[in-house]
Amino acid sequence: MLAVKCPSCSEPLDVQLNFNFEPDKIRTGNYSGWRYEQFFPYAEERRIITLSEGWTPLVRFSNNVYFKLESANPTGSFKDRGSTVLVSALHELIEDSGGYISEDSSGNAGASMAAYAARAGLKARIYVPESVAGPKFSQIKFYGAQVIKVSGSRARVAEEAQKLEKGKFYVGHIFHPLFKDGIRSLAYELFEQFGWSVPEHIYLPVSAGTLLLGIISGFKHVSDSGGIEALPKIVACQTRRVSPLYHRFKGLKYDPPETLKSVADALVSVKPPLLELMVRRLKESGGDAVIVEENEIMEAFLELARRGFFVEPSSAVAYAGYKKQLKNNEVSKEDKVAIVLTGSGLKTTVKPFDAGSHG
Ligand SMILES: Cc1ncc(COP(=O)(O)O)c(C=O)c1O
Protein backbone atom coordinates (compact mmCIF):
# COMPACT_ATOMS: atom_id res chain seq x y z
CA MET A 1 0.00 0.00 0.00
CA LEU A 2 1.29 3.46 -0.89
CA ALA A 3 0.46 6.43 1.33
CA VAL A 4 -1.98 8.77 -0.43
CA LYS A 5 -3.09 10.70 2.68
CA CYS A 6 -1.17 12.39 5.48
CA PRO A 7 -0.79 9.79 8.26
CA SER A 8 -1.44 12.38 10.99
CA CYS A 9 -4.24 14.62 9.62
CA SER A 10 -5.64 12.34 6.83
CA GLU A 11 -5.59 15.23 4.33
CA PRO A 12 -4.73 14.16 0.77
CA LEU A 13 -1.06 14.61 -0.09
CA ASP A 14 -0.10 17.33 -2.53
CA VAL A 15 2.97 18.06 -4.67
CA GLN A 16 4.95 21.21 -3.82
CA LEU A 17 6.73 22.87 -6.73
CA ASN A 18 10.01 24.46 -5.69
CA PHE A 19 11.24 25.44 -9.15
CA ASN A 20 10.06 27.83 -11.85
CA PHE A 21 8.23 27.22 -15.09
CA GLU A 22 10.78 28.32 -17.70
CA PRO A 23 9.81 28.09 -21.39
CA ASP A 24 13.41 27.58 -22.49
CA LYS A 25 13.45 24.26 -20.60
CA ILE A 26 10.68 22.83 -22.79
CA ARG A 27 11.75 19.91 -25.02
CA THR A 28 10.36 21.52 -28.15
CA GLY A 29 11.10 18.47 -30.31
CA ASN A 30 8.81 16.28 -28.19
CA TYR A 31 5.18 16.48 -29.36
CA SER A 32 3.59 15.03 -26.23
CA GLY A 33 2.97 16.28 -22.71
CA TRP A 34 6.49 15.07 -21.92
CA ARG A 35 7.86 18.15 -23.66
CA TYR A 36 7.40 19.53 -20.10
CA GLU A 37 9.42 16.71 -18.55
CA GLN A 38 11.72 19.17 -16.76
CA PHE A 39 8.75 20.29 -14.68
CA PHE A 40 8.02 16.74 -13.46
CA PRO A 41 11.41 16.07 -11.87
CA TYR A 42 10.25 13.03 -9.91
CA ALA A 43 9.65 11.07 -13.13
CA GLU A 44 13.02 9.91 -14.41
CA GLU A 45 13.40 9.98 -18.19
CA ARG A 46 14.43 6.32 -18.52
CA ARG A 47 11.36 5.22 -16.55
CA ILE A 48 8.76 7.16 -18.51
CA ILE A 49 5.76 5.10 -19.64
CA THR A 50 4.07 6.97 -22.47
CA LEU A 51 1.55 6.48 -25.27
CA SER A 52 2.33 9.99 -26.57
CA GLU A 53 -0.47 11.64 -24.63
CA GLY A 54 -0.92 15.39 -24.40
CA TRP A 55 -0.01 18.14 -26.90
CA THR A 56 -3.61 17.79 -28.02
CA PRO A 57 -5.08 20.12 -30.65
CA LEU A 58 -6.34 23.57 -29.74
CA VAL A 59 -9.02 24.32 -32.31
CA ARG A 60 -10.68 27.65 -33.01
CA PHE A 61 -14.44 27.05 -32.91
CA SER A 62 -15.76 30.55 -33.49
CA ASN A 63 -14.29 34.03 -33.19
CA ASN A 64 -12.98 33.93 -29.63
CA VAL A 65 -13.91 30.42 -28.60
CA TYR A 66 -11.36 27.61 -28.70
CA PHE A 67 -11.71 23.92 -27.93
CA LYS A 68 -8.92 21.93 -26.34
CA LEU A 69 -9.43 18.43 -27.71
CA GLU A 70 -8.53 16.22 -24.78
CA SER A 71 -10.66 13.56 -26.44
CA ALA A 72 -7.70 13.10 -28.79
CA ASN A 73 -5.58 11.51 -26.05
CA PRO A 74 -4.58 7.85 -26.56
CA THR A 75 -7.37 6.35 -24.43
CA GLY A 76 -9.88 9.04 -25.40
CA SER A 77 -9.77 11.31 -22.36
CA PHE A 78 -7.68 13.84 -20.44
CA LYS A 79 -6.98 11.20 -17.78
CA ASP A 80 -3.93 10.03 -19.74
CA ARG A 81 -2.02 13.09 -18.51
CA GLY A 82 -2.38 11.84 -14.95
CA SER A 83 -1.83 8.16 -15.71
CA THR A 84 1.40 8.67 -17.64
CA VAL A 85 2.96 10.64 -14.78
CA LEU A 86 1.67 8.36 -12.03
CA VAL A 87 2.64 5.09 -13.74
CA SER A 88 6.03 6.47 -14.83
CA ALA A 89 6.86 7.37 -11.24
CA LEU A 90 5.69 4.11 -9.66
CA HIS A 91 5.87 1.17 -12.07
CA GLU A 92 9.32 -0.03 -11.06
CA LEU A 93 8.45 -0.02 -7.38
CA ILE A 94 5.25 -1.98 -8.05
CA GLU A 95 6.94 -4.42 -10.40
CA ASP A 96 9.92 -5.03 -8.10
CA SER A 97 7.60 -6.01 -5.30
CA GLY A 98 5.53 -8.28 -7.55
CA GLY A 99 2.46 -6.13 -6.98
CA TYR A 100 -0.41 -4.84 -9.08
CA ILE A 101 -2.25 -1.55 -9.54
CA SER A 102 -5.61 -1.00 -7.88
CA GLU A 103 -7.80 1.87 -9.07
CA ASP A 104 -11.44 2.92 -8.65
CA SER A 105 -13.15 4.81 -11.43
CA SER A 106 -16.45 5.59 -13.09
CA GLY A 107 -14.80 4.54 -16.36
CA ASN A 108 -12.35 6.90 -18.03
CA ALA A 109 -9.65 6.91 -15.36
CA GLY A 110 -9.94 3.12 -15.14
CA ALA A 111 -9.51 2.77 -18.89
CA SER A 112 -6.56 5.12 -18.83
CA MET A 113 -4.84 3.46 -15.89
CA ALA A 114 -5.43 0.03 -17.44
CA ALA A 115 -3.76 1.20 -20.67
CA TYR A 116 -0.69 2.61 -18.93
CA ALA A 117 -0.41 -0.48 -16.71
CA ALA A 118 -0.49 -2.58 -19.90
CA ARG A 119 2.15 -0.37 -21.48
CA ALA A 120 4.34 -0.83 -18.38
CA GLY A 121 3.73 -4.59 -18.31
CA LEU A 122 1.94 -4.35 -14.95
CA LYS A 123 -1.21 -6.09 -13.79
CA ALA A 124 -4.17 -3.83 -12.95
CA ARG A 125 -7.41 -4.33 -11.08
CA ILE A 126 -10.03 -1.67 -11.77
CA TYR A 127 -13.06 -1.29 -9.48
CA VAL A 128 -16.04 0.31 -11.24
CA PRO A 129 -19.63 1.15 -10.29
CA GLU A 130 -22.25 -1.32 -11.51
CA SER A 131 -23.59 1.42 -13.77
CA VAL A 132 -20.30 1.75 -15.70
CA ALA A 133 -20.88 2.69 -19.34
CA GLY A 134 -20.57 -0.35 -21.64
CA PRO A 135 -17.92 1.08 -23.98
CA LYS A 136 -15.68 2.07 -21.04
CA PHE A 137 -16.10 -1.35 -19.42
CA SER A 138 -15.07 -3.04 -22.68
CA GLN A 139 -12.13 -0.70 -23.11
CA ILE A 140 -10.76 -1.57 -19.65
CA LYS A 141 -11.19 -5.30 -20.36
CA PHE A 142 -9.47 -5.06 -23.73
CA TYR A 143 -6.41 -3.52 -22.08
CA GLY A 144 -6.22 -6.73 -20.10
CA ALA A 145 -7.12 -5.41 -16.65
CA GLN A 146 -9.30 -7.29 -14.21
CA VAL A 147 -12.56 -5.36 -13.73
CA ILE A 148 -14.58 -5.61 -10.54
CA LYS A 149 -18.10 -4.17 -10.53
CA VAL A 150 -19.16 -2.84 -7.12
CA SER A 151 -22.77 -2.17 -6.20
CA GLY A 152 -23.80 0.86 -4.13
CA SER A 153 -22.42 4.38 -4.08
CA ARG A 154 -19.27 5.72 -5.74
CA ALA A 155 -17.70 5.87 -2.25
CA ARG A 156 -18.26 2.10 -1.87
CA VAL A 157 -16.31 1.50 -5.08
CA ALA A 158 -13.37 3.46 -3.61
CA GLU A 159 -13.56 1.52 -0.34
CA GLU A 160 -13.30 -1.79 -2.17
CA ALA A 161 -10.34 -0.60 -4.22
CA GLN A 162 -8.55 0.52 -1.04
CA LYS A 163 -9.09 -2.70 0.95
CA LEU A 164 -5.72 -4.08 1.96
CA GLU A 165 -4.72 -7.16 -0.01
CA LYS A 166 -1.41 -8.82 -0.69
CA GLY A 167 0.45 -7.18 -3.59
CA LYS A 168 -2.17 -4.45 -4.04
CA PHE A 169 -0.90 -0.91 -4.69
CA TYR A 170 -3.82 1.47 -4.43
CA VAL A 171 -3.10 4.35 -6.82
CA GLY A 172 -6.66 5.77 -6.95
CA HIS A 173 -6.52 8.79 -9.22
CA ILE A 174 -8.63 10.95 -6.89
CA PHE A 175 -6.31 10.58 -3.92
CA HIS A 176 -2.93 9.96 -5.44
CA PRO A 177 -1.11 13.29 -5.64
CA LEU A 178 0.83 12.38 -8.79
CA PHE A 179 -2.28 11.84 -10.90
CA LYS A 180 -3.59 15.38 -10.30
CA ASP A 181 -0.09 16.67 -10.68
CA GLY A 182 0.13 15.14 -14.15
CA ILE A 183 -2.81 17.33 -15.24
CA ARG A 184 -0.56 20.40 -14.83
CA SER A 185 0.72 19.78 -18.36
CA LEU A 186 -2.68 20.87 -19.69
CA ALA A 187 -2.16 24.39 -18.31
CA TYR A 188 1.36 24.59 -19.77
CA GLU A 189 0.04 23.52 -23.16
CA LEU A 190 -2.74 26.09 -23.19
CA PHE A 191 -0.22 28.78 -22.23
CA GLU A 192 2.14 27.70 -25.02
CA GLN A 193 -0.56 27.14 -27.67
CA PHE A 194 -2.10 30.54 -26.98
CA GLY A 195 1.31 32.07 -27.80
CA TRP A 196 2.51 32.51 -24.20
CA SER A 197 -0.72 34.06 -23.03
CA VAL A 198 -3.92 32.72 -21.52
CA PRO A 199 -7.59 33.13 -22.47
CA GLU A 200 -9.83 35.10 -20.14
CA HIS A 201 -12.06 32.13 -19.26
CA ILE A 202 -11.56 28.38 -19.23
CA TYR A 203 -14.59 26.08 -18.93
CA LEU A 204 -14.27 22.52 -17.70
CA PRO A 205 -16.54 19.74 -16.44
CA VAL A 206 -15.96 18.89 -12.78
CA SER A 207 -16.72 15.77 -10.77
CA ALA A 208 -14.00 14.52 -8.37
CA GLY A 209 -11.89 17.60 -9.10
CA THR A 210 -8.60 16.21 -10.43
CA LEU A 211 -8.90 18.17 -13.67
CA LEU A 212 -9.82 21.36 -11.82
CA LEU A 213 -7.07 21.07 -9.19
CA GLY A 214 -4.45 20.04 -11.73
CA ILE A 215 -5.13 22.86 -14.18
CA ILE A 216 -5.25 25.49 -11.42
CA SER A 217 -1.93 24.19 -10.08
CA GLY A 218 -0.39 24.48 -13.57
CA PHE A 219 -1.59 28.04 -14.16
CA LYS A 220 -0.54 29.05 -10.66
CA HIS A 221 2.91 27.66 -11.38
CA VAL A 222 3.15 29.73 -14.57
CA SER A 223 1.92 32.80 -12.70
CA ASP A 224 4.25 32.31 -9.70
CA SER A 225 7.09 31.95 -12.19
CA GLY A 226 6.22 35.35 -13.70
CA GLY A 227 4.80 34.00 -16.98
CA ILE A 228 1.36 35.62 -16.64
CA GLU A 229 0.03 38.50 -14.60
CA ALA A 230 -3.42 37.09 -13.90
CA LEU A 231 -4.82 33.57 -13.90
CA PRO A 232 -7.57 32.82 -16.40
CA LYS A 233 -11.02 32.61 -14.80
CA ILE A 234 -11.58 28.88 -14.38
CA VAL A 235 -15.29 28.04 -14.60
CA ALA A 236 -16.23 24.71 -13.01
CA CYS A 237 -19.23 23.25 -14.88
CA GLN A 238 -21.47 20.68 -13.19
CA THR A 239 -24.79 18.99 -13.82
CA ARG A 240 -27.65 20.08 -11.58
CA ARG A 241 -27.83 16.55 -10.14
CA VAL A 242 -24.13 16.27 -9.34
CA SER A 243 -23.24 19.78 -8.21
CA PRO A 244 -21.68 19.72 -4.72
CA LEU A 245 -18.92 22.13 -5.75
CA TYR A 246 -21.30 24.62 -7.34
CA HIS A 247 -23.52 24.64 -4.25
CA ARG A 248 -20.68 24.97 -1.75
CA PHE A 249 -18.98 27.62 -3.88
CA LYS A 250 -22.16 29.70 -4.06
CA GLY A 251 -22.98 29.11 -0.36
CA LEU A 252 -26.09 27.05 -1.19
CA LYS A 253 -27.35 23.81 0.33
CA TYR A 254 -26.92 20.70 -1.80
CA ASP A 255 -29.19 17.67 -1.55
CA PRO A 256 -27.69 14.85 -3.59
CA PRO A 257 -30.25 12.76 -5.51
CA GLU A 258 -31.05 9.28 -4.15
CA THR A 259 -30.25 7.67 -7.46
CA LEU A 260 -28.10 9.07 -10.19
CA LYS A 261 -29.41 9.25 -13.69
CA SER A 262 -27.72 11.72 -15.95
CA VAL A 263 -26.62 11.65 -19.54
CA ALA A 264 -23.27 12.92 -18.18
CA ASP A 265 -22.30 9.50 -16.84
CA ALA A 266 -18.67 10.42 -16.03
CA LEU A 267 -19.71 13.11 -13.55
CA VAL A 268 -20.85 11.08 -10.56
CA SER A 269 -19.05 12.42 -7.47
CA VAL A 270 -21.91 13.62 -5.27
CA LYS A 271 -19.57 13.70 -2.24
CA PRO A 272 -16.11 14.33 -3.68
CA PRO A 273 -13.43 13.66 -1.06
CA LEU A 274 -11.47 16.72 -2.23
CA LEU A 275 -14.44 19.12 -2.07
CA GLU A 276 -12.96 21.50 0.53
CA LEU A 277 -9.73 21.77 -1.42
CA MET A 278 -11.64 22.33 -4.68
CA VAL A 279 -13.70 25.17 -3.20
CA ARG A 280 -10.63 26.78 -1.65
CA ARG A 281 -8.51 26.60 -4.80
CA LEU A 282 -11.34 27.77 -7.06
CA LYS A 283 -11.92 30.80 -4.80
CA GLU A 284 -8.21 31.63 -4.46
CA SER A 285 -7.82 31.47 -8.24
CA GLY A 286 -10.75 33.87 -8.82
CA GLY A 287 -12.78 31.19 -10.59
CA ASP A 288 -16.51 30.60 -10.88
CA ALA A 289 -19.00 27.72 -11.06
CA VAL A 290 -22.13 27.03 -13.11
CA ILE A 291 -24.71 24.24 -13.30
CA VAL A 292 -26.58 22.99 -16.32
CA GLU A 293 -29.76 20.97 -16.82
CA GLU A 294 -30.06 17.66 -18.64
CA ASN A 295 -31.71 19.25 -21.69
CA GLU A 296 -28.93 21.85 -21.90
CA ILE A 297 -26.29 19.08 -21.85
CA MET A 298 -28.08 17.18 -24.61
CA GLU A 299 -28.43 20.31 -26.73
CA ALA A 300 -24.74 21.16 -26.28
CA PHE A 301 -23.74 17.55 -27.06
CA LEU A 302 -25.74 17.54 -30.28
CA GLU A 303 -24.64 21.00 -31.33
CA LEU A 304 -21.00 19.99 -30.90
CA ALA A 305 -21.51 16.77 -32.85
CA ARG A 306 -23.31 18.64 -35.65
CA ARG A 307 -20.28 20.86 -35.94
CA GLY A 308 -17.82 17.99 -36.05
CA PHE A 309 -16.88 17.64 -32.38
CA PHE A 310 -18.01 14.25 -31.16
CA VAL A 311 -17.45 14.24 -27.40
CA GLU A 312 -18.95 12.57 -24.36
CA PRO A 313 -22.09 14.22 -22.98
CA SER A 314 -20.02 14.71 -19.79
CA SER A 315 -17.61 16.84 -21.81
CA ALA A 316 -20.47 18.76 -23.45
CA VAL A 317 -21.31 19.97 -19.92
CA ALA A 318 -18.46 22.49 -20.28
CA TYR A 319 -19.85 23.88 -23.53
CA ALA A 320 -23.34 23.97 -22.02
CA GLY A 321 -21.86 25.91 -19.07
CA TYR A 322 -20.32 28.43 -21.43
CA LYS A 323 -23.59 28.88 -23.34
CA LYS A 324 -25.46 29.42 -20.10
CA GLN A 325 -23.02 32.07 -18.86
CA LEU A 326 -23.17 33.76 -22.26
CA LYS A 327 -26.96 33.91 -22.03
CA ASN A 328 -26.73 35.31 -18.49
CA ASN A 329 -24.12 37.89 -19.54
CA GLU A 330 -21.55 36.39 -17.17
CA VAL A 331 -19.15 36.15 -20.08
CA SER A 332 -19.09 38.30 -23.18
CA LYS A 333 -18.82 37.22 -26.81
CA GLU A 334 -15.70 39.35 -27.00
CA ASP A 335 -13.91 37.40 -24.23
CA LYS A 336 -11.33 34.87 -25.30
CA VAL A 337 -12.47 31.48 -24.05
CA ALA A 338 -11.08 27.94 -23.98
CA ILE A 339 -13.40 24.98 -23.40
CA VAL A 340 -11.84 21.67 -22.44
CA LEU A 341 -13.49 18.82 -24.33
CA THR A 342 -12.46 16.08 -21.95
CA GLY A 343 -13.55 12.78 -23.52
CA SER A 344 -14.40 11.10 -26.82
CA GLY A 345 -17.96 10.64 -28.04
CA LEU A 346 -17.08 7.07 -28.99
CA LYS A 347 -17.48 6.25 -25.29
CA THR A 348 -21.07 7.39 -25.02
CA THR A 349 -24.00 5.06 -24.52
CA VAL A 350 -26.41 7.66 -25.95
CA LYS A 351 -28.04 6.41 -29.17
CA PRO A 352 -29.22 8.75 -31.93
CA PHE A 353 -32.85 7.77 -31.25
CA ASP A 354 -32.39 8.66 -27.52
CA ALA A 355 -31.61 12.18 -28.62
CA GLY A 356 -35.32 12.74 -29.36
CA SER A 357 -36.34 15.25 -31.96
CA HIS A 358 -32.74 16.43 -32.23
CA GLY A 359 -31.38 12.97 -33.01
C1 LIG B 1 -14.94 12.81 -19.69
C2 LIG B 1 -14.75 13.37 -18.32
N1 LIG B 1 -14.85 14.69 -18.15
C3 LIG B 1 -14.70 15.25 -16.95
C4 LIG B 1 -14.46 14.49 -15.82
C5 LIG B 1 -14.32 15.16 -14.48
O1 LIG B 1 -13.03 15.05 -13.99
P1 LIG B 1 -12.75 15.09 -12.44
O2 LIG B 1 -13.34 13.84 -11.85
O3 LIG B 1 -11.29 15.15 -12.35
O4 LIG B 1 -13.43 16.30 -11.91
C6 LIG B 1 -14.36 13.10 -15.93
C7 LIG B 1 -14.12 12.26 -14.75
O5 LIG B 1 -14.27 11.07 -14.76
C8 LIG B 1 -14.49 12.52 -17.22
O6 LIG B 1 -14.39 11.21 -17.40
Image: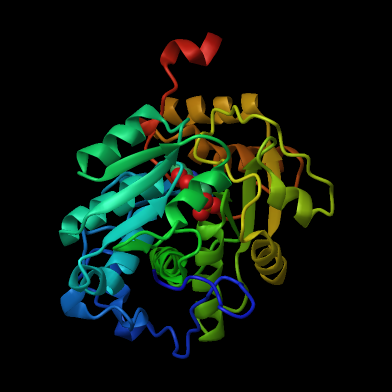
Asked whether residue 168 appears in the rendered view, the answer is yes
Q: Residue 250's x, y, as percent? A: 81, 53
| Between 203 and 78, the one nearer to me in the picture | 78
The extreme right residue here reads: 252
* Occupied quadrant, residue 232: bottom right
Q: Residue at (31%, 62%) from the top-left corner?
A: 166
Q: Quadrant of the N terminus?
A: bottom left
- Counting from the top left corner in percent of width and height, residue 93 is at 25, 74
The quarter of the displayed image where residue 100 is located: bottom left
Q: Is residue 187 above or below residue 51?
A: below
Query: Seen in the image, is 58 located left or right of residue 226?
Result: left
Describe residue 245's horizontal placement relative to residue 200 as left or right: right
Tell me the residue at 27%/53% (across/down): 124
239 relative to 338 in the view: left or right: right
> With respect to residue 192, does 317 lie above or below?
above
Give above or below for 150 relative to 98.
above
Quarter of the image where one finds residue 96? bottom left
Q: How is the image coloured?
A: rainbow
**Residue appearing at x 36%, y 28% in the figure:** 134
Instruction: Pick the residue in front: 277 or 216.
Output: 277
Q: Residue at x 35, y 47 (%)?
A: 126
**What is the total number of numbered labels drawn onto the structure image?**
0
Q: Is residue 334 visible?
A: no
Residue 204 percent across, percent down from the top left: 55, 50
